[in-house]
Image (cartoon, rainbow, N blue to C red):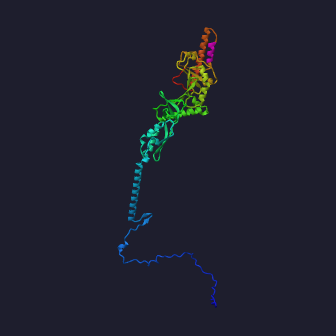
Amino acid sequence: MLDAPEQDYAREPKVPRRTSVAPKRKLRRDFSEDFADDFPEDEDAPTGRKQKGVRLRFRWGMPATKWGRMSAGFGLVVLAGLCFGALLLVRDSVMHDPRFFIQSASSIEIQGNVHLTRDELVNIFGEDVERNIFYVSLAQRRTQLQQLPWVEHATVMRLLPNRLRVSIVERTPVAFVRQGSQIGLVDASGVLLDMPTHGDAHYSFPVVTGILASDPLSTRAARMKIFEQFTSDLDSSGEKISEKLSEIDLSNPEDVKAVIPDNGKDVLVHFGDTDFLNRYRKFEEHLQEWRTQYPTLSSVDMRYERQVVLDMQPGASATNAGSSVAVLPTAAAADGMNAAAPSEAAAKPAARTAIKPHAKAHVAAKKAPVSKWKRASAKAKAHRATAKAHARVVHHAAGNSRYHSSQVVHP
C-alpha cells in the first residue's frame, strides 16, 4: 500500500503577536434573550386566569404586601394562643397533681439550728402541709423566719417534687444582759436573745447592764460596739482579761464601769472611754496595797491622769480612817507610799481625804510619848500641816481633773 504523500504546509513567519492592552475578562452572556421566544405567552388565554393567587414578597424577613402582613400577623396570634393554652394546661395539671403536694412535716428539712428547736421552725410552715409546693411563698416564709430573734439569716428552697429545705444562720451571743430580775443574752448587734431551751451550749460571759429592751436597736448596737472595743482592748495582750470581769455597765458611753471580783469581794472600777488596758494594769498593780489600807474599798476611779479616787463602802467604821473617799496622787501610789487618813475625817464621813507625805508627820506625832499638853500641841500642828496639804491637793486637782457631784473635797 502506498502511503499518501504528506502535505507540506508553509511555515508561519515568526512575527511577534500583537496583544490587546485591555485586561483579560470573562465573557458574559445574557441568556435571558435566548429563551425569550421559547415560551410565548398565550395571548388567547382569558385575563382572569392570569390574576389568580396571592404573591408574597418578603422584604427583610417580613411580607412586603398588605395581605402578606395580615396573614403573618394572624399566624403569630394563633401560635401565641396555642402556646398560652398549652401552658395553662400544663400548669393546671401540675397544680392538681398529688405528686407535688407536701405530704407531712417530715417533708421539710431544717439545717443550721443549734439553739432553736425543729418544732419552733416547722410551726411557721404549718399551713403549708398537704398543700401544693408551688403555692408556698418562699419570700414570705423567709421573712417570717428572720423575725425570730435567734435567726440572723434564712434561706428557703423547693426540692421537687414535694420537699422544702430550710437553712438558717443563728446569731452568736457575746454577753449576758440583765433585764430587771431576768438574765438573757445579747449579740454584737444589740439584739436581745432569750436563754435557749435547746442544746448543750455553755457560756462564760460577763453580765452587761445599761441595755434595755425599750431602747431602739441603733442605741443598743452603739453600746455593744463600745463593749466590743472595751473587751478587745483588754484582751489585746492575749491574757483574756475580760473573762475576769463579772459585770460591765454601759449606761454611760463616756465611762465604762466594770465589776471585778477580788478574794470574794467585788470592786467597781471606772475605766472612762479610752486606754482601758493601761488603766486595768495600774489597778491590778496597786489593788492589794489599797486593800491593805482600806479593807472596805468598794470602787476605784481610774479616769484621772494624776490621781486615783477610792470609794469606801457606805457606813464604813472609823477604824478604816473614817472616810468614804480617798484621793491618792498617782505618783505617791506608784512609789508605794503608806499613808493614813487624818483623824478629822472620822467626824466627817463624807469628806475626801488627801494623801500626801505631810500625813506622815501627823502619824508620827500621834505615836510620840509626850505629855497631854504637848500631845495636844503636836496634834494641832499636825492638823495645820494636814490642812495645808489638803489645800495644795485640792488646788492641784482643780486644774487637772474634775470630780463627781457626789464626792466632797475636804477643806
The magenta span reads: 359-367
User: In this image, 235 relative to 49: left or right?
Assistant: right
Q: Quadrant of residue 103?
A: top left
Q: Which residue is found at the position 63% from the left and 13% from the top?
A: 367
Q: Nearer the viewer, residue 281 or 134?
A: 134
Whether residue 361 is in magenta: the answer is yes
Quarter containing the N terminus: bottom right
Residue 335 position, x and y percent, is 64, 23
Residue 89 visible in the displayed image = yes
Q: Nearer the viewer, residue 79 or 227?
A: 79
Q: Nearer the viewer, residue 272 or 225?
A: 225
Q: Is residue 65 above or below residue 166?
A: below
Q: Quadrant of residue 275?
A: top right
Residue 390 position, x and y percent, is 58, 20
Residue 254 position, x and y percent, is 53, 30
Q: Nearer the viewer, residue 344 or 17?
A: 17
Whether residue 318 is in magenta: the answer is no
Q: Which residue is found at the position 63% from the left and 17% from the top?
A: 360
Q: Which residue is found at the position 55% from the left and 34% from the top?
A: 228
Q: Is residue 301 above or below residue 22?
A: above
Q: Is residue 336 above or below residue 214?
A: above
Residue 299 visible in the displayed image = no
Q: Main secondary structure of the magenta part?
A: helix
Quarter containing the C terminus: top right
Residue 196 position, x and y percent, is 49, 33
- Total count of labels: 0
Q: Is residue 184 above or below residue 364?
A: below
Q: Quadrant of residue 54?
A: bottom left
